[in-house]
Image (spheres, rainbow, N blue to C red):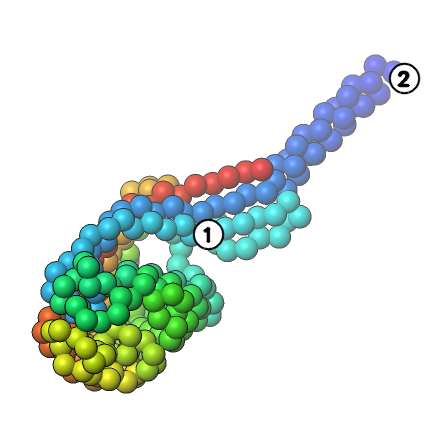
Amino acid sequence: MTFRNKIMGFASFALAGIALQSVSAVAETQLTFAVTGGFQAQPEYFGAEDYVTGPLLGLSPKYLQLDSGKSFGNPDPWADKLGFNVSPSLRVISERDAETYSEFSGLEDIDTAIELGAQVSYATQNVKVFGAMRKGFGGHEGYVGELGLDLIAKPTDKWRIAAGPRVNFGDDTFADTYFGVAPGSVNYGAYDADGGVLSTGVSLEARYQFNDNWGVTGQVEWSRFQNDAADSPIVEAGSDSDTRVSVGLTRVLRLNF
């Protein structure tokens, strides 16, 4: 083998090695997700005048690229999901007992409820409409849902602001659990609450993105009770509206394996 052929062979081997490394890097599995931590404030129970604060925790997968080359999601974790989307819907309702709230003396305690379901949405750059449906487990066994519309504005690359109306509804089981009053109550007259639209309101959310990895989000939701919820003795003796506030700091994490 001549010296020239040796050089050409070595160069080909080196280029092949670089190509294999590049393919390996591209084919590497990548997972991007966001972790959110903060606090939230909300009424102690539906119709309460006093508020309680607690932690806000969240985990949201954003993007997955498999070593086969297939990918799911958007590589930009801060980008909105456009078009039709289906996502999980979860809500936790704290327990309500007479030992903590003396106004419910004579009534049965209500355990913590976990609601599981799905949300269907359609979004453009400036508008998002959605509907959610959930089934309760624990404190109540009913069905609840929410309809909403958001107008979205992005004044700068760092800011995202969304605001719009909300409609909340629940079936007879849910309504009677949280707004009904069984005979034997010390403080309220007996009341049988039926389901339907239980509250209407608005939501305002603002997000500021510090950089590619960090951001902060604040949200205020206000609603007024409607129909059988508004006529409940619990609401009439307490508050006819419901305000919820949350602030969360988000960190985007990227894993390669």
| Residue bearing the label numbered 1 | 62
Q: Quadrant of the C terminus?
A: top right
In the rendering, at what x and y percent does residue 190 appear?
A: 18, 82
Q: In which image quadrant can residue 112 be found?
A: bottom left
User: As rendered, which of 21 and 163 lies closer to the eye?
Assistant: 163
Q: Is residue 176 above or below residue 87?
A: below
How many labels were placed on the picture?
2
Left or right of 133 in this view: 103: left
Work out whether mark 1 precedes mark 2 in sequence or the reverse, and give the earlier one: 2
In the rendering, at what x and y percent does residue 23 appear?
A: 66, 38
Q: In which image quadrant can residue 206 be found?
A: bottom left
Measured in 3D between alpha carbons, the distance from the residue under mark 1 to the one under mark 2, in whole angstroms, is 54 Å
User: As rendered, which of 106 and 70 lies closer to the eye?
Assistant: 106
At 38% across and 46% down in the image, what residue appears?
A: 35
In the rendering, at what x and y percent does residue 77 appear?
A: 42, 50
Left or right of 169 in this view: 99: left
